[in-house]
Amino acid sequence: MKKATKRLLGIFMFSILLSGMTLAQNGIIGSGFGTSNFDWSNTDCFNSGANNTRILETTPGGTGNQYFRLVTCWDSNFNQWGPSSTVNDLEVTIESAVGTSEVVQNSTSKAYYINVPNASYKYVFKTRGGGNPPSNPDFVVFEVQGTVRSVSSVSNSLSGNAQHGSDVTITATLDGSFSTGQSVYLRYTDDNYSTSTVIEMSGSGTSYTATIPGSTNQIGKTISYYVFTSGDGLTISATDSDFFAINLNNNSGSNYSYSVESSISISGDAGWRLLSLPKTGGLVTDVSDDSPVQGVSGGDDATADANFIIYDSDATFEQPTNVTTAWGDGLGFGLYFYNNTTNGSSTLPVTLDALGAEPSSDVTVTLNPAASGYTLVGNPYASNYNTNSMTATSSNISNTIAFWNDGTSSYSTQDRSSGYIISPWQGFWVQTVSAAATTLTIPTSGKTSSSTTGTFFSKEVNNRGDINFSLSSESTYDEAIRLAFRSEASVGYDSDDFGKLTPLVPSYATMAFESNELLKSVESLPYNLEEEVTLSLQPQMVGVSGDFTFAWNGLETIPGEWELILHDYETGANINMRDESEYTFFQAAHAKVSSSPLSLLNGPAAVAMKAKAEGNRFGITIRPTSVSNETEESPALFALEQNYPNPFNPSTTISYSVQEAGAVNISVYNLMGQKVATLVDETKAAGQYNVRWNAAGAASGMYYYRLEAGGQSITRKMTLIK
C-alpha cells in the first residue's frame, strides 16, 4: 500500500516501434528539471545505474508545473519524445502510468509536467537500460524531500554459516537518515537469482533490518543478497528490483552471501551418542572435521579402537570402510566423545556441523533380515521428523523405537505410532516383527515444523494405556521398561513389543520382561484384557551390586478395576502396585564390568540382551477382574491360576492362593499320571503366592499341575513346546 508521505511520481512504459527504432529514453530536456541548465536547448543524459539500468538525480527549476520531454541521447541524435497529438501537455501524477499510445517521437509542441511543491526537493529519473535502442525503455520518477541517501555497509547476524531452518537478520547502515520519499529494501535468493524475494527493511535513523526466514535457509543452500534504496512503502517485484533501485550496495558487484548447514551441540560427559547425518551421501569426514575419529582408515588414528561405528545388515557393529565412503542415507551411526584434550579431542560441548543438501526424495534403507532383528537408522533430513510416517514392508516393524540417552546411561523407548517427533541428527533403533520386513521407507512427507518436545501430535488413539517403569541405583538408571496396553495388541509377540538393547556403557543395571528366553523393553497386552496374566521380569546387573529401586507410574491410563501385583520370587514379597509406586531390593552383580567402552567392535556384537539361564526373580500379575466375589477385606480364597506364559519354553510361572495356614503341595504330572516335578511341599500362611517351573529337562507336551491344601485340590493343564 502507498504511504501518505510517498511521492512516487511516474512509471512510464514506452515500448513502441517507430520507423524500425524502439524509443531510447536516456535523457531529459526542458525548463522544469536539470542538473545545471533549465532550458529547451540542453539535454541531461542519464548515468549507469544498478545492473545496467540508467539513472539521473535532478533538481526542479521551481515550484508548480515543471515541464520536460524524454530524449534519445544515444548516437547524439537527441530525438525528443512527448505526449501524443491527441492530448495537451500531460501531467505526471503519483503512480500514474503513461502508455505507448500517449508517446510520440519529435512531439516538440507538447510536454510532460510534474506539479512540484518545493523547489528544494530532489527528483530521480530511471530507465531499465541504455543502448540504441534500449531493450526495455520503461521510465520511473522518484521524489525525495531531502538528501538522496545510500547504503554505506551491510552486515548479518551470523558468526559463521547459517543453521538450517533458522532466521538470519540482515542490517543495512545508511550514510545518513532518510528524508520523506526514501526507504531501503533487501533482495535475497537461494538459486542465484533465478527466483528471488524483495522486502522492505524496517528501522530508524541510519540502521535498518530485515529477516531472511528459516524456510529459505535450507541445508546445502547458498543464500545471496544485496540491499538498495528506493521509494518509500513500495511493493517491488524481483524483476523490477534493479529498475527501482536508486542506490545499490551489492558488495562491489559480488553480492553478499552465506552457506546453510545443519549442526548439533554434543554436551554432557564422555560416552556414546547415536546419530544420523542430515544430508545425502554423508561421510565420516562430515563429522571428523569437528571431532576426532579413530579406528577408521583415513582417520586420526586408524590403528586404535574405533570410536565411529555403524551396524551392518549382518547384525554386527563395524567401522565404515574409510572416512570418504558413504554408508547410506537414513542409516544411523555411533560416535564416542572423549571429553578431553588428548590427541586432538575437545572437551564437551562440541558442535558437529554438516554442509550439503538433504535427500530430495523418500529414503529407503535395508533392514536386518532376521525376525525380531534390529537396524540402526536415523533422521536423514535437516528438519524435525514425525516417526509415525515411516513404513516398512508388510508393516512388520515394531511401533516402538529406542534412543540411547547418554545422560542417564539408558535406552529410552518411545511409541512412534503416536506421532513421536525427532530432531535432525537423531539416530535410533527399529526392530522387525518378522523376516517379511525387508526395507524401511522414510518419506519426505514426515518432515515437520512441530517441535521435538516428545508430545504426541497425532490424533489421540482410543483404548491405549502405558505403565512406565524405571530401575535406579546410586550409579545406574534404566528407563527403557514399559507395559503397553493397545486395542490391537495380543498376548504373544506383536508390533507393539520391542526387545531389550544392551546399554552402550561398561557397567549397567537393567530390568526387562522375559518371554521364551527373549528379553523385552516393551511388553504389550490387549487393552480389553479378559484373562489374568503373569509377566516375568528379569534384572541384569553388570559390574554393579547393591540396592536398586524399581518404580512405576501410569496406572491411571488403564481400567481402575484391574488389580496389579508385583512378585519378588526370591523374598516372597507381593506388592499391590496400586498402593505403592516403587519397590527396593538388593541384587548382587551377575557379570563383571566390560573393560572398555569401545569394546563393541571386539567381535560380533548382538545388541539384543539375552535372558539368564537361572530364571527370573520378578513377576507382575494383572487381574482384569477380581478372582474373588468377596470384598477387598476378605481373606484370600483357595485358588490355582492358569500358568503364564502358556504355551512356554522352558519356564513358566504358576500363581496360587490358600485360604488358611497349613501344608501346601504343588506337583506336575505327565499325561500318564506320572509325577515329574514337585514345585511346593511346605507349610504356608494364608495368602497369594507364585512358583516357577523350569522344564528344561522335560520333553515337549501337555502336563497337569495340581494344588493340594486344607483337604482341597485343583488341577489345571499347561503345554511345553520346545
Image: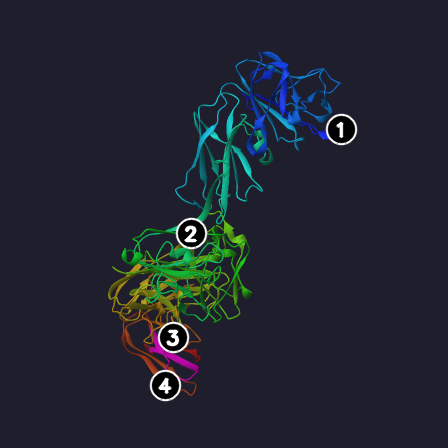
User: In the image, what residue type sits under mark 2?
Assistant: Gly
Label 4 and label 1: CA atoms lie apart by 119 Å
Q: Secondary structure at mark 2?
A: loop
Disc 2 from disc 4: Cα separation: 54 Å
**Marks 3 and 1, Cα distance to the nearest angstrom?**
103 Å
Q: Check residue 30 for magenta coloring.
A: no
Q: Which residues are magenta?
A: 691-708
Numbered badge on residue 652: 3
Q: Nearer the viewer, mark 3 or mark 1?
A: 1
- Return the disc, 4 or 1, that comes first in the chain's sequence: 1
Residue 693 forms part of the magenta stretch:
yes
Q: For the residues marked 3 and 4, what is the alpha-carbon distance in whole angstroms?
A: 17 Å
Mark 1 neighbour class, 10 Å CA radius: few under 14, some 14 to 19, many 20 or more: few
Q: Earlier in the sequence, mark 3 or mark 4?
A: 3
Q: Which residue is mark 1?
A: 19
Q: Which residue is mark 4?
A: 675
3 or 4: mark nearer the eye: 3
User: Hey, what amino acid is under mark 4?
Assistant: Lys
Counting residues from the start of the chain, the first of labels 1 and 2 encountered is: 1
Point out the frontmost of discs 4 and 1.
1
Q: Which mark is residue 454?
A: 2
Q: Main secondary structure of the magenta part?
A: strand
Whether residue 64 sits left or right of residue 506 in the image: it is: right
Residue pictured at 45% horizontal, 49% vertical: 261
**Coloration mode:** rainbow
